Amino acid sequence: MRSAHAHIIAFASFLLLATAVSVEGAEVPTVTMVIDNYDYMISLFPDDYPNRRQALKACASIATEAGALKAFWDENGPEILSSLSYYAGIDWVESDFDIYIVKYFPDYACQRPMTIPLEGKKNGSQIISVPQGLSHYITLFQQLSKRLLEQVMLPGAPRSSLAAYPMMQKTARRFDNLANLLALRTLEDFWNIDSVLAVFRSEHWRQREIGQDVLFGYLWDRWRLSGDSTLAFWLTSESNTSALVELTRMPVRAQSSLGRGTSGLQSPSGGRLGISVARDPSGFFRVLNVDTLKLGYISGLRKNDVIRSIEGAVPGNMKELFSLLLAYLEQGAEVKILRDGRPEAVIIYSWDSVTEP
């Protein structure tokens, strides 16, 4: 009798476990990876694929890589979606969507519709090739992370208040960095993290993800993701006036007031940066003046800031200092400073990278 009773308990426990698994599975969307996207590829590049035969040929050329990626997804998809939600502290709202694998795309990838190009970014006749292998898996997790973060922006989302936090602003050093942090942390459960980081920190990815300075300098070691310390937890714990928020803000163009023109104003340095510096007794360069209408000021530099390094390099003279700043303007030059004796950082952007308010 005892043995029969034990079997009944064990069977009941199994039923409870099976029910729990089925409920958990229902919490993630049904996501299908589609690799034979003939019509989609034709719609993207009608001049390159004027007929279905040409599109079939293009799909055949990426069949091996696409097949490997699909096999990985078919085996691990639900677990990946669940893990992303777990580390993010954000539930999936969408019930289903597809992932389209194509040969080329006008961008490196897209989360709506979820699209991953296996050979490159194509605009007209220009093609920027992308690395093969592990790089595609990083892209997959990255775009899924962006899609998950966007769940809080959908109507009726249970964590919709998260969308109002500054770090959710869709810029390279805010939203994109949150997605990359979540993607890399989740990918660590499926792949060797040293191999992943070696690829992600390669020259291709550094150019593609210009926010890596903030990701690895400020988020990677401080925002450690776990079930108790989710991305949502760190996001809500970050003050709207914190150093991180200040560091990652996008500059806005200074507007002239009262209709006054600015053509007669000259920046202290006589250039785009609008700063003048002098060697400090400490050996670093101290900011003497900042033009409030130029790049230095709107990016966060202030009078008496002591410049310690620019993109990790310590300038040896004034010419080198300005050369470094100008060289990194397009991607954003990370400038580490001392302000009132405290270490801080600002990122100086190019005017060309600033969006009109």
Image: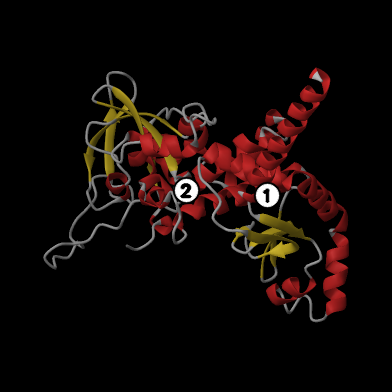
When the figure is inspected, residue 348 is found, relative to residue 284, above or below; the finding is: below
Which residue occupies the extreme left position in the image? 258
Q: Is residue 312 visible?
A: no
Crowdedness of circle 2 by 10 Å Cα count: few (<14), some, many (20+)? Answer: some
Which residue: 56% across, 51% down?
A: 92
Of 273 and 204, nearer the camera is: 204
Which residue occupies the extreme bottom position in the image? 50
Looking at the image, residue 349 sits to the left or right of residue 150; the answer is left
Q: Quadrant of the N terminus?
A: top right
Marks 2 and 1, the one that precedes in the sequence: 1
Q: Position of residue 289 (x, y in %)?
A: 21, 39
Instruction: Please name the amino acid that badge 2 sits on.
Output: Phe
Crowdedness of circle 1 by 10 Å Cα count: few (<14), some, many (20+)? Answer: many
| Mark identifier at residue 140 | 1
Circle 1: element type:
helix
When the figure is inspected, residue 116 is found, relative to residue 7, above or below; the finding is: below
| Mark identifier at residue 11 | none
Q: Which residue is denoted by mark 2 in the rendering?
A: 175
Which residue: 54% across, 45% down?
A: 179
Q: Position of residue 71 (x, y in %)?
A: 83, 49
Q: Position of residue 37 (x, y in %)?
A: 77, 68
